[in-house]
Image: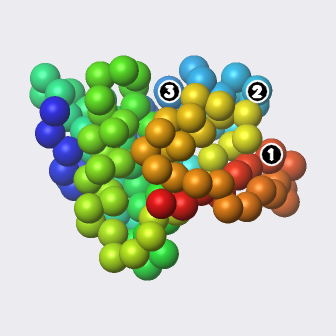
Amino acid sequence: MLVRGALLCELPIAASLYQRVLRDTFTWLPAWRHNAQDFLNAAADESVHVAVADARIVGVASVFEPDDFIHSLYVAERGQGAGKALLDHVVARARGPVSLKCQTQNLRARAFYAREGFRELERGADLLTGVAWVRMQR
């Protein structure tokens, strides 16, 4: 598995993966809430990294570097090590503690981050949608 910065031409592929994974796993929200354009809009101000296996992008992470904030980390094939590889790559590049927000109902992701040394710092809810989240830091 290779983890590296995404090429500009790979951003649409990364955005498509983002949309597909959200629609498949965030079943507590309507599918229309997840779209590739949201990822592309955020990526304009973030560094985007991809996990590549067998010449295919199998995971994506985007980071708002001024705050070492992981905005997105999604993998198409869980259990293959792409999530950990992306997380390790992002953490190694950070200048300070790394943080993220995880939807409260996303128990699988919360467990993953806890195993990787993140601790919960704060709870809240999105002002527009009311979706509950937990902020974690490592």
Q: CA distance from mark 3 to mark 2?
A: 15 Å
Point out residue 89 in the picture as x, y percentages from the top left corner.
26, 53
Q: Nearer the viewer, residue 110 or 76?
A: 110
Label 3 with label 2: CB-CB less than 8 Å: no
- Kind of residue at badge 2: Trp
Point out residue 85 in the picture as x, y percentages from the top left corner.
27, 41
- Decide which of tag 3 and tag 2 comes sooner along the chain: 3
Residue 20 image label: 3
- Decide which of tag 1 and tag 2 comes sooner along the chain: 2
Residue in the picture at 86% in, 49% down: 130
Q: CA distance from mark 3 to mark 1?
A: 20 Å
Q: Is residue 102 left or right of residue 3?
A: right
Mark 2: which secondary structure? loop
Residue in the picture at 82% in, 54% down: 125
Establish if 136 lies above or below 94.
above
Point out residue 101 in the picture as x, y percentages from the top left corner.
62, 54
Check disc 2 and report the residue beneath it. Answer: 28
Categorize mark 1 by other alpha carbons within 10 Å: few (<14), some (14-19), many (20+).
some
Mark 1: which secondary structure? loop
Residue in the picture at 39% in, 75% down: 96
- Kind of residue at badge 1: Val
Q: Nearer the viewer, residue 43 or 88?
A: 88
Establish if 62 lies above or below 78.
below
Mark 3: which secondary structure? helix
Check disc 1 and report the residue beneath it. Answer: 131
Label 3 with label 1: CB-CB less than 8 Å: no
